[in-house]
């Protein structure tokens, strides 16, 4: 092979190599755009039953440690009130209710993102008094006695804990009898507050609410056959603007580590 042919082949090889390298170079602008997309935070609004307040914040902190670019805003309240807010168009991404009734209502109206509804947790109904309460109250039946002057219960129509409490008292045939001494509350945490401050002699809350307070004690736990199963369903709201982030958050709530954290706060796995 003569020298001219060798040089020609070598030149072709070098040109081919340079073209290949040039084609495979990544555009710096593309890197910048990708990085910005990854760093851009997503923001989720989570409406959850008042009884979940402490546990949700703890689980949310775990989530944000793994997803630092996601901001979570919480809206806690009675499940009935939260349901109404969603029906009226409130910007909510994820909803967790303390009963299936409210979630059923939203699903019937087509307000849930199809395929995202899940059963998240379970709870118990308990009767509580303040730690310094000297009344001889030992069970739910004592609410109808003269020992109790005032008793608090969540509003049954809008507060799931009140709904379950009413079922327990009705099964004992004392609900109507104690109406005159019942102080209805806007949510289960208000019932807890009434008992803590001594504004009422006793109250019905969830076991999880009693667990987070060092000012009350549980004196009775309702038998499971006196009320419907206490199921906490979760779902993504159809009008969410953060579909993938909302779905990912629900998956995280159902994960083993999240369930274990919920158990620390007294919830039970579904």
Image (spheres, helix red, strand yellow):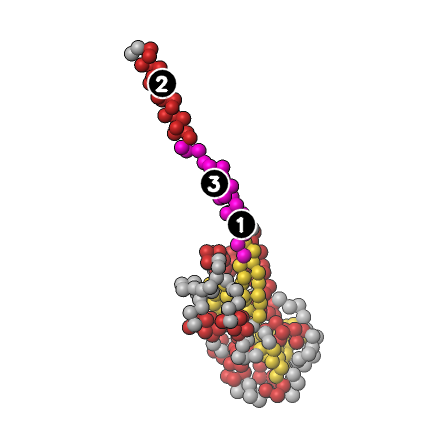
Residue at image x 47%, y 67%?
A: 233
Q: Is residue 38 magenta?
A: yes
Figure check: 11 above or below 167: above
Where does the image place residue 144, in percent across and percent down from the top left? 60, 86
Name the residue carrying label 2.
10
Q: Earlier in the sequence, mark 1 or mark 3?
A: 3
Q: Nearer the viewer, mark 1 or mark 3?
A: 3
Answer left or right for 230 relative to 185.
Answer: left
Residue at image x 60%, y 76%?
A: 186
Other-residue count near label 1 (Cα within 10 Å), few / some / many at <14 / 14–19 / ≥20: few
Figure check: 189 above or below 94: below
Where does the image place residue 104, in percent across and percent down from the top left? 44, 72
State the extent of the magenta-drawn residues as a range: 23-43
Q: Nearer the viewer, residue 212 or 89?
A: 89
Answer left or right for 14 relative to 170.
Answer: left
Q: Earlier in the sequence, mark 3 or mark 2?
A: 2
Where does the image place residue 140, in percent across and percent down from the top left? 58, 81
Residue at image x 49%, y 79%?
A: 226
Q: Is residue 52 magenta?
A: no
Q: Earlier in the sequence, mark 1 or mark 2?
A: 2
Name the residue carrying label 1.
40
């Amino acid at each position: 092979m003569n020298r001219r042919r060798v040089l020609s082949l070598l030149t072709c090889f070098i040109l081919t190599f340079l073209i290949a390298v040039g084609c495979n170079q990544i555009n710096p602008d593309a890197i910048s755009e990708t990085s910005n997309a990854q760093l851009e935070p997503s923001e989720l609004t989570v409406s959850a039953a008042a009884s979940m307040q402490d546990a949700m914040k703890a689980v949310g902190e775990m989530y944000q440690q793994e997803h630092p670019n996601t901001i979570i805003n919480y809206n806690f309240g009675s499940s009935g009130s939260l349901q109404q807010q969603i029906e009226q168009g409130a910007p909510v991404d994820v909803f967790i209710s303390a009963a299936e009734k409210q979630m059923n209502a939203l699903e019937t109206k087509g307000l849930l993102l199809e395929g995202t509804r899940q059963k998240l947790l379970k709870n118990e109904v308990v009767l509580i008094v303040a730690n310094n309460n000297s009344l001889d109250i030992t069970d739910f039946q004592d609410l109808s006695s003269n020992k109790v002057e005032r008793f608090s219960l969540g509003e049954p129509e809008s507060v799931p804990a009140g709904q379950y409490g009413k079922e327990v008292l009705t099964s004992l045939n004392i609900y109507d009898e104690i109406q005159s001494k019942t102080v209805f509350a806007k949510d289960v945490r208000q019932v807890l507050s009434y008992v803590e401050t001594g504004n009422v002699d006793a109250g019905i809350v969830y076991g999880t609410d009693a667990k987070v307070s060092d000012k009350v004690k549980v004196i009775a736990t309702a038998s499971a056959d006196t009320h419907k199963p206490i199921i906490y369903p979760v779902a993504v709201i159809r009008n969410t603007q953060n579909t993938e982030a909302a779905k990912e958050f629900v998956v995280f709530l159902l994960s083993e580590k999240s369930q274990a954290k919920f158990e620390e706060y007294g919830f039970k796995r579904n």
